[in-house]
Each structure stands twice: as structure tokens, then as C-alpha cells.
Amino acid sequence: MRIVGLTGGIASGKSTVSNLFKAHGIPIVDADIVARNVLKKGTGGWKKVVAAFGEDILLENGEVDRAKLGQIVFSDPGRRQLLNRLLAPFISRGILMEVLKLWIKGCSIIVLDVPLLFEAKMDKWTKPIVVVWVDPKTQLQRLMIRDGSMEEDAKSRINAQMSLDLKRSQADIVIDNTGSLEALHEQFQKVLTQITRPLTWTEFMLSRKGAFLTLFSIFVGVAICKRSS
Ligand SMILES: CC(C)(COP(=O)(O)OP(=O)(O)OC[C@H]1O[C@@H](n2cnc3c(N)ncnc32)[C@H](O)[C@@H]1O)[C@@H](O)C(=O)NCCC(=O)NCCS
Ligand SMILES: Nc1ncnc2c1ncn2[C@@H]1O[C@H](COP(=O)(O)OP(=O)(O)OP(=O)(O)O)[C@@H](O)[C@H]1O
């Protein structure tokens, strides 16, 4: 199974791109949805977060007040690291379960849409890594419009993530989403062709599976030679 990593910055257009993958029948594992599920009332993640942040972050119905928790963690790096540390094991486990389900279903290619793919060191699970890049001004504008947020709040959310330029430098494939949706669709078609084509022999040999098969063949070959000598 090929696991494609899809990442970028907040409001850079990951969900827009992942919807295009979905429309082409490619299943998506969305880390934001997994993260929401592991913070639902009564779950292990919820208990840890309530114990660390206190009941003040709860709504009357006992669910986490996401807007309130967001305000706390996006304005305080220490509190954000604490939240990340508490939720990371639940989120990785949740993502792994979703991947396993799709593997059991026999999917040959899936896309992991993870905003913090590099920050959470999940990049090693995925190949190729697609980064949706956008210029900083457009990113800020789109974020403020989408969330109806003030500039200061939007900036603090952008600054809570690794810089988009650094993410771009670590990508296998970059989608520049600064332009129109039509321009995005055009780039997407090329990316789709690129990631759905079969691997060349060299790419396969350089992949982990290829390296494993090569080592395994050498090992079996040596064992057979030893037996027959
Ligand atoms: C702080 C929370 C409650 C705010 O909820 P809210 O509904 O306002 O935002 P939402 O979850 O939709 O996230 C929107 C975007 O914020 C960014 N973001 C979310 N969490 C983080 C974080 N810890 N650090 C940096 N950016 C983040 C992502 O780009 C995400 O797509 C929520 O984001 C959360 O629980 N974050 C911690 C879990 C996490 O790491 N999620 C990212 C999945 S890898
Ligand atoms: N090329 C585009 N032109 C105009 N608007 C766009 C374009 N691409 C995305 N948008 C809009 O920008 C906003 C952010 O896009 P999207 O929600 O896909 O980002 P995201 O990276 O998934 O964000 P998050 O990290 O918060 O989940 C949305 O309102 C979306 O409709």
C-alpha cells in the first residue's frame, strides 16, 4: 500500500486538495478528524486534557470548548506543547487504526492529511510527501476569512507551526496554492498522475520494501550457498 503524505500550513489548502483526492476515489485519513475524535467527552484524550487544563475548558455539556482551548494553546507555546504531548499518542494510534482499516479493505493507495506531519515526525511513514504551499499574505487572508478571526489570532495560529518554506524544502512534491482554484485543479491533475503511476525499478529498489526484499534475497541466497557447499 502506498501512503502519500499531505501537509502544509494552516489554511494553505490541504482540505481543498484532499477533497480532490476523495473525488478521484482515493481514501483520506484526516488527522484533524482523528484529533477531534480523541478529544470527545469521556475518551482517554479528554480525561488527560481535563486533568491538565482543568474543568474551565469544558462546555456545559462536558465537551471541550475548542475555541477556548484554542485561545489558550495558540497564545502559549508551553501549553501548546503540553496539549501536543498529551494527545500525540492517541492521535498516532487513531491514524494507525484508520490506515489499518484501509489496508484490510485492500486499498492500494491512501492519503494521510496531517497538518503537523513534520512536527510530529510522521513524515517517515509516508512517500511521497505533498506540501500545499501558499504565500504568507494569501495564507493570512484566507485564514481570517475562513475562521472569521482577527489578524493577531490568525498570526498566532500560523506561527504555531513549522514555517511553510521549511516544509516546502522537505517535500517530494509541492503544490503552489497561491493562485485560483482553477490553477490548483491543474496542478492537482499532474500530481495525481505522478502518484498513481507504478514505481520504476530504481524507485522500488530505493524504497524500504525494495531494500527489504533485496536484503532478504541476499540472505536466502547466502543460506542456500552455505547449505550446498
Ligand atoms: C486546540 C484545538 C482544540 C483547537 O480546535 P479548533 O477547532 O479551533 O481547530 P482545528 O482542530 O479545526 O484545527 C485547525 C488547524 O489548526 C492547526 N493546529 C491544530 N492543532 C495544532 C497544534 N497543536 N499546533 C499547531 N497547529 C495546530 C492545524 O493546521 C489544523 O488544521 C485543536 O486544534 C486541537 O485539539 N489541537 C491539538 C491536536 C492536534 O495536534 N491537531 C492537529 C492534528 S495533527
Ligand atoms: N486556490 C484557492 N483560491 C481561493 N480560496 C481557496 C483556495 N484554496 C483554498 N481556498 C480557501 O482557503 C481556505 C483554507 O483552505 P483549506 O480549509 O483547504 O485549508 P487547510 O490547509 O485544510 O486548513 P487547516 O489547516 O486549518 O485544516 C478555505 O476557506 C478554502 O475554501
Image (spheres, rainbow, N blue to C red):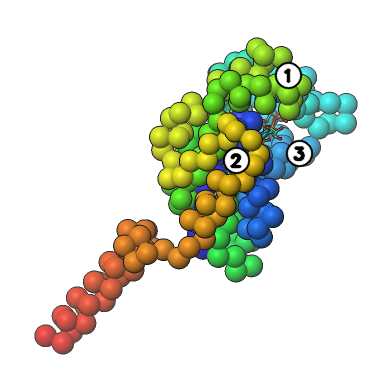
| In-front residue for pair 30/62 | 30
- Outermost residue, right side: 60
Q: How far from the left and from the top, in percent, is residue 175?
A: 52, 40
Let me know if residue 106 appears in the view.
Answer: yes
Q: Earlier in the sequence, mark 2 or mark 1?
A: 1
Question: Under 8 Å from ligand 2: the CB of mark 2?
Answer: yes
Q: Which residue is mark 1?
A: 149
- Outermost residue, top side: 152
Left or right of 81? Residue 181 is right
Marks 3 and 1 sit apart, C-alpha to C-alpha, by 24 Å
Left or right of 99? Residue 68 is right
Q: Earlier in the sequence, mark 3 or mark 1?
A: 3
- Outermost residue, bottom side: 228
Q: Residue at x 49, y 33 (%)?
A: 119
Q: Residue at x 60, y 41 (%)?
A: 184
Q: Amino acid at mark 2?
A: Ala
Q: Earlier in the sequence, mark 2 or mark 3?
A: 3
Which of the two discs, 2 and 3, sits closer to the camera? Answer: 2
Marks 2 and 3 sit apart, C-alpha to C-alpha, by 37 Å
Q: Residue at x 43, y 30 (%)?
A: 166
Q: Which residue is mark 2?
A: 183
| Mark 3, other Cα within 10 Å: few <14 / some 14–19 / many ≥20 | some
| Mark 1, other Cα within 10 Å: few <14 / some 14–19 / many ≥20 | some
Which of the two discs, 3 and 1, sits closer to the camera? Answer: 1
| In-front residue for pair 29/64 | 29
Let me know if residue 74 appears in the view.
Answer: no
Task: Specify the label residue 40 is tagged with.
Answer: 3
| In-front residue for pair 108/165 | 165
- Quadrant of the rendered structure where residue 141 is? top right
